[in-house]
Image (spheres, grey):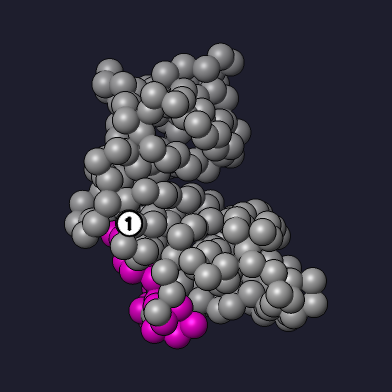
Amino acid sequence: AQISAGYGHSLLLSTDGQVFGFGMNVQGQLGIGTPSEKELHPVAVNMMGVLFKNVTHISVYQHGVMTDSHGDVFSYGDNMHGKLGDGTVITRIGKHKIANVLSAAFESSTGDAHSLVLFSDGQVFAFGSNAYGQLGIEKISEELVPQELLPIAIYTTGVLQGKIIIQISAGLVHSLVLSSDGQVFGFGDNTYGQLGIGRITWSEKLPIAVNTTGALQGKRIVQMSAGTTHSLVLSS
């Protein structure tokens, strides 16, 4: 049903809602209960002996964030900068249910040190490092390395006013969201132009629309993906 490639490991989601992983597992990122150097063959993801079932969406980097058929969100693995959204920076071998969600979650996306979760009402919540503005929040922090340890809603007053978000993608330190009318918006690191706004900037801390002149003029975007320092979009 889905494949997600992380930093040195991969997860597979089967049609019956089970998850399997293989590759690096030094920080417990495979979710198999105990850390190990690597797993050469697919193993069923289980948390402290309990198999993951009814999973609907998976996303991994050095940590994992998953949604299930009940609309709940779970996270595990490396927790630097609070990217598990559990209020701590402690690495978790077992899964943790992310609390205080207001509606059913159906998509997650993980970057290097941040995570995004999309809910059924179109709201997007972010957590983890905000050093480059990759959380897309209005909050101003005086921390040396800004971070949010609990989920916080992205800024929707500006260009996202009235937009319904239908897809999310977390890159290394930037993020993209896709609205129901086929527009793409980005925030975070833009030192390589990965936000597609037509100019280089150190970062964009609030959502900004991808430039739709030139090659994208008149195009409706149906899918997008944020990579390490670049982004791709697919038109209809």
Percent across and percent down for residue 186 are 56, 70
Q: Is residue 44 left or right of residue 223?
A: left
Q: Is residue 156 magenta?
A: yes
Q: Which residue is painted at 24% across and 41% down in the image?
A: 70
Residue 160 in view, yes or no: yes
Task: Locate the C terminus by quadrant.
Answer: bottom right
Percent across and percent down for residue 148 are 35, 64
Residue 24 in view, yes or no: no
Q: Is residue 103 left or right of residue 89?
A: left
- Magenta region's main secondary structure? loop
Percent across and percent down for residue 11 are 51, 30
Dot 1 corresponds to which residue?
A: 120
Q: Is residue 172 magenta?
A: no
Quadrant position of residue 7: top right
Quadrant position of residue 193: bottom right
Percent across and percent down for residue 132 are 54, 70
Q: Is residue 63 above or below residue 167?
A: above
Neighbor class of circle 1 (other Cα within 10 Å; few <14, some 14-19, many 20+) is some
Identity of the residue furthest to the bottom in this view: 158
Q: Is residue 217 left or right of residue 23?
A: right
Using the image as rendered, state which of residue 77 and residue 160 is in the foreground.
160
Q: Is residue 8 above or below residue 226?
A: above
Q: Which residue is painted at 44% across and 65% down in the image?
A: 165
Q: Is residue 35 above or below residue 233?
A: above
Q: Which residue is painted at 79% across and 71% down in the image?
A: 215
What SS does tag 1 mark? Answer: loop
Range covered by the magenta-colored residues = 139-161
Question: As shown in the figure, which amino acid type bears the numbered disc 1?
Answer: Ser
Q: Which residue is painted at 40% across and 79% down in the image?
A: 162
